[in-house]
Amino acid sequence: MILLNQAYIQQALPQGRALVFDEIDSTNEYLLQHYQSLPSGSLCLAETQTAGRGRRGRKWYSPVGENLYFSMLWHYKSTNLSQISSLSLLVALVIAETFEELKVEDIQIKWPNDIYYQGKKMGGILNESRIDQSGFYLVIGIGLNLAMSSVDPNIVTQAWSDLSEYQLDRNQIATVLARRLQQTLSEFEQQGFAPFLERWYKFDIYYQQAVRLITENAEIHGISQGINDKGELLLERDGKIETFAIGEISLRSN
């Protein structure tokens, strides 16, 4: 096991500070607590998390030294917050393109922001924020299964995958991902999500496939036709296209 190297990551970081912990409750929580004192672009990484979390308050399984637990702080300077909901899709795209750069094949994205490898979940994203008089602060939390030997079935309840066959260096992934994220977030503030739309389709796992949307009260069946420039899912039903915003919705194959 090659440990995360704070000095190496810091040297490669275009902006911000790199902070690496042997153990932490949550990399996201650390940045949320220190967002006012850290520069934009700062990273928090850990060998393990004792209280890692995913979407909807779920626990995120964080075994020691096997995966990447990565959070980035970003001071969003634009006053236009209308496209913030599409940021999680943008982050998923950046992750997919990072692995493509590292020669990993068969990476996919399941709307809105789950990372899949060979048809099974390999990573997830949790964006959280703070707003004060100085602006909008985003914390981007990323968990990626890189060499996971086993799981706790009480926490991991769906089919999962990892990238152990590639024997990737977590330090390299962290630095490439950080550089791509910082560049792309800057572009997003100026241009919104529209310029990235076509790049998304390359990785969309359910594009033009039969799917079902699971909501609190119903299941909705249709054909996925990708997303629009707001990051909304486009679902074809009875020859018509309906849009669904990111929220308390789960997307599954039919």
Image: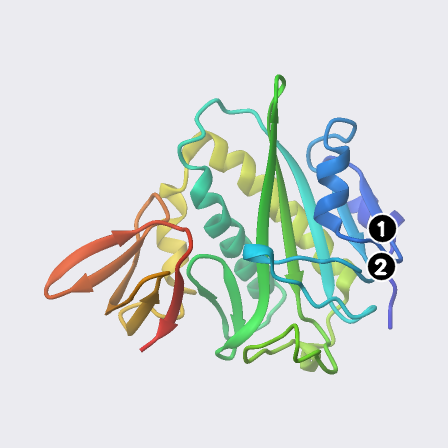
> Which residue extends farthest top?
133
Instruction: Say if mark 2 contacts mark 1, CB within 8 Å.
Output: yes
Judged left or right of residue 200, residue 3 is right
Judged left or right of residue 189, residue 132 is right
Query: Residue 82, how many percent across, how many down?
Result: 40, 32
- Disc 1 marks which residue? 20
Report, in whole angstroms, how far the alpha carbon at label 2 lies from the one at label 1. 7 Å
Q: Secondary structure at mark 2?
A: loop
Residue type at the position of mark 1: Val
* Quarter of the image where the N terminus is located: bottom right
Write down the quadrant of residue 240 in the picture. bottom left
Write down the quadrant of residue 174 in the picture. bottom right
Above or below, comparing residue 63 to residue 142 in the picture = below
- Disc 2 marks which residue? 4
Q: Which one is closest to the eye, mark 2 or mark 1?
A: 1
Above or below, comparing residue 59 to residue 119 in the picture = above
Residue 105 visible in this rendered orientation of the protein = no
Numbered circle sitting on residue 52: none
> Which residue extends farthest front?
217
Residue 222 visible in this rendered orientation of the protein = yes
Query: Residue 14, how many percent across, how many down?
Result: 72, 38
Residue type at the position of mark 2: Leu
Q: Secondary structure at mark 1?
A: strand
Query: Residue 91, how many percent across, how many down?
Result: 53, 50
* Quarter of the image where the C terminus is located: bottom left
Above or below, comparing residue 68 to residue 126 in the picture = below
Of 74 and 59, the residue lying toward us: 59
